[in-house]
Amino acid sequence: MERKIFSLKYRPKTFDEIFVQDVVVKTLKNAILNNKIHNAYLFCGPRGTGKTTTARIFAKALNCEKGMTINPCNQCEICKEIDNSNCLDVIEIDGASNRGIDEVRELREKARFNPIKGRFKVYIIDEVHMLTTEAFNALLKILEEPPPYVKFIFATTNPSKIPKTIISRCQRFDFRKATVNELVLRLKEIAQKENLLLEEDAYYQIAKRADGAIRDAEVILEQVSVFATPPIRGEDVEKLLGAVPEKIIFEYFEELKKANIKDVLKFLVKIEKEGSDVFEFYKSILFSFRTILLIKNDLPQKVLGITAEEYQFFQQIGNLFSDNELHEMVNLLINYEKLLKYTSFPEIILENLSLALLKYFKLKKEMGVISLGEIYSLSPKIASLLEDTLIKEVDNLIHIYYPPVKGKLTILQEHEEEIKAVLKKILNKEVKIKFVQRELKEEKKISEILDKTFEGFEEIE
């Protein structure tokens, strides 16, 4: 028996099997049930989200020999021909390679003839945005007044390139990306059917690398099943795809937290020698900061689709900074993208970027003895109490500077012994505490402070 690749073997054949596109499926089903079939449909969305697959299922639903139905039988001759891409009444056209006016004129001429076996002639044009302007113009008339037995389904990853005159003649459906958790569930279903053994982290690594595309996730799963011996681990996926390992990102942030220039540069030189792709490393840093910002704004682990270890680690980093400071760092990273893409020396740009990020961590370290992240790892309750405070050591005495908020001092004093116990664990010594009310002043942006505090920073060797 001929072996099929996963993406074809597990390709949906009915509406109920279509993955995560509930709105699209419900609308198309209702159109069939109420006999309100439109002349033309526009399926928009990222690659691998099921646009062409849905178009085929819709074509089967319209032409099934058992009648127009929301549940095509997949057993009749027409259903089988559509599944095998050899049905004469369902014509699939690649818009990227058949993009000229001559091809569209030929399509118009053939559309005049009645369907051979089915009720409708269905034209599925993939990557329709690749058609030329002249080709789009040639489509206009037949789209507006097609023969009653002709239906068009256009699929595109870039609807902005399609003329508005075309879009206005179509019913538009937007296909969404699958979330990491949705992809993990899908991968587990396939792994169970294929008797594959994967560790939990491996599923998450595949789902993250697929970037919301079901097809990409299935392809990676099949590839890694051949590459690694069971049980397949997250490290196997990272190694196969040339991705930056999670532990490397963790180490990078730990070096930034130390706020030591030499250690950060040594770490960067080490990963460069190990062959890590600089731009992939940059993207991992950028997405890590995005994750930190989302966690800072209370998005749960399940929504983010990351492991508990990642969530806890990035939560601790986020507790070091305000939202404003994190936004500044994200903007800094975004501004470095072009430099990294178009330079002949990406390693130097990455080092310069890391030093710029280091300024933020260095300032935070000098401002406070202990970060809220360290406190949170031991006691979320105490970390919550100390929010908006600044902790500094002055002459072997821990000063806790609190904002002039009514009742704040009383709350801190009530929990003084608990605070001491947490600080003792972190500093590994007995501690004495002094609560000091700080003045309420308008906070400056950290970037403004940095410009003055670290003047000439780049010249330090």
Image (tube, rainbow, N blue to C red):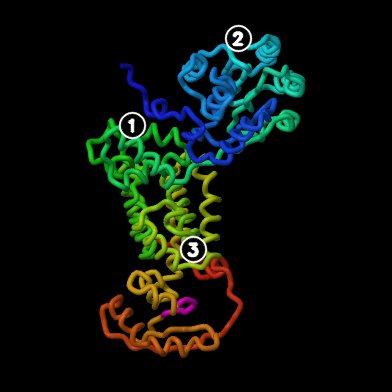
Q: Residues within 10 Å of mark 2 (few under 14, many from 20)?
A: few
Q: Specify the amino acid type for callout 2.
A: Ile
Range of residues picked out in magenta = 387-391
Q: Residue at x 51, y 66 (%)?
A: 455
Q: Are marks 2 and 1 in contact (CB under 8 Å)?
A: no
Residue identifier under label 3: 298
Q: Residues within 10 Å of mark 3 (few under 14, many from 20)?
A: few
Residues under labels 2 and 1: Cα distance?
41 Å
Distance, label 1 to label 3, CA atoms, is 35 Å
Q: Earlier in the sequence, mark 1 or mark 3?
A: 1
Mark 2, residue position: 116
Q: Is residue 96 visible?
A: no
Q: Residues within 10 Å of mark 1 (few under 14, many from 20)?
A: some
Which structural element holds mark 3?
loop
Q: Secondary structure at mark 1?
A: helix
Could you tell me which residue is drawn at 40 percent across and 29 percent down? 10
Task: For the N terminus, give its image quadrant.
Answer: top left
**In the drawing, does residue 278 fall left or right of residue 37?**
left
Q: CA distance from mark 2 to mark 3?
A: 58 Å
Left or right of 111? Residue 434 is left
Residue 209 at x, y percent in the picture: 41, 41
Q: Mark 3 is on which residue type?
A: Asp
> Mark 1 belongs to which amino acid?
Gln
- Give the quarter of the image for residue 345: top left
Q: Which mark is residue 438?
A: none
Q: Please tell me whether residue 389 belongs to the stretch shown in magenta.
A: yes
The residue indicated by pointer 1 is 223
* Nearest-to-viewer mark from 2 and 3: 2
Q: Earlier in the sequence, mark 2 or mark 3?
A: 2
Whichever of callouts 2 and 1 sits on the residue coming sooner in the sequence is: 2
Asked if labels 3 and 1 touch by Cβ distance under 8 angstroms, the answer is: no
Residue located 68% across and 17% down the image: 149
